[in-house]
Amino acid sequence: MEGFQSFLTLVYLISIYVFFKFVWGSEGKDERGERIMGKTAIGAFSVFPVGWILIDSYHEYIQPISYSLYRELISMLIPITFLICAILIVHNRRKT
């Protein structure tokens, strides 16, 4: 399990690097970059509220979960959001 967590941490760090390199770089500041970020934001940043609703609905209606598991699940939404954001940036950059 330790190796899998290390792999996920590496993937998370790479996705943050891709995101911030695009946003702070010259490519993210022109008109094309703004279009790419707009498409990316629509797809990626809806993951967090939808995931939160799913976790909360599971806790409320299916089976109660402990606070520590709830906290871990919510904290996993942030890396998932950045991962999807980085994937969409790369995809939209190639497509546009």
Image (tube, grey):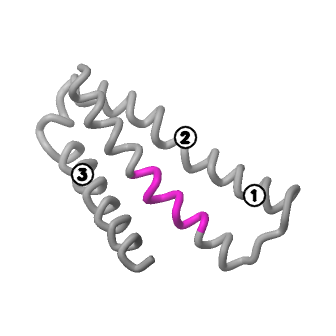
Q: What residue is pinned by disc 1? A: 56
Q: Residues within 10 Å of mark 3 (few under 14, many from 20)?
A: few
Which disc is residue 20 wearing?
3
Q: What residue is pinned by disc 2? A: 46
Give the Cα separation between the discs numbered 3 and 1. 30 Å
Quarter occupied by residue 38? top left
Side of 34 relative to 42 (left or right): left
Quarter occupied by residue 13? bottom left
- Residue at 46% over, 54% down: 80
SS at badge 2: loop
First in sequence: mark 1 vs mark 2 = 2
Name the amino acid, label 3: Phe
The residue stretch that appears in magenta: 73-82
- Residue at 75% over, 58% down: 56
Toward the viewer: 43 or 23? 43
Name the amino acid, label 1: Asp
Q: Residues within 10 Å of mark 1 (few under 14, many from 20)?
A: some
Image label count? 3
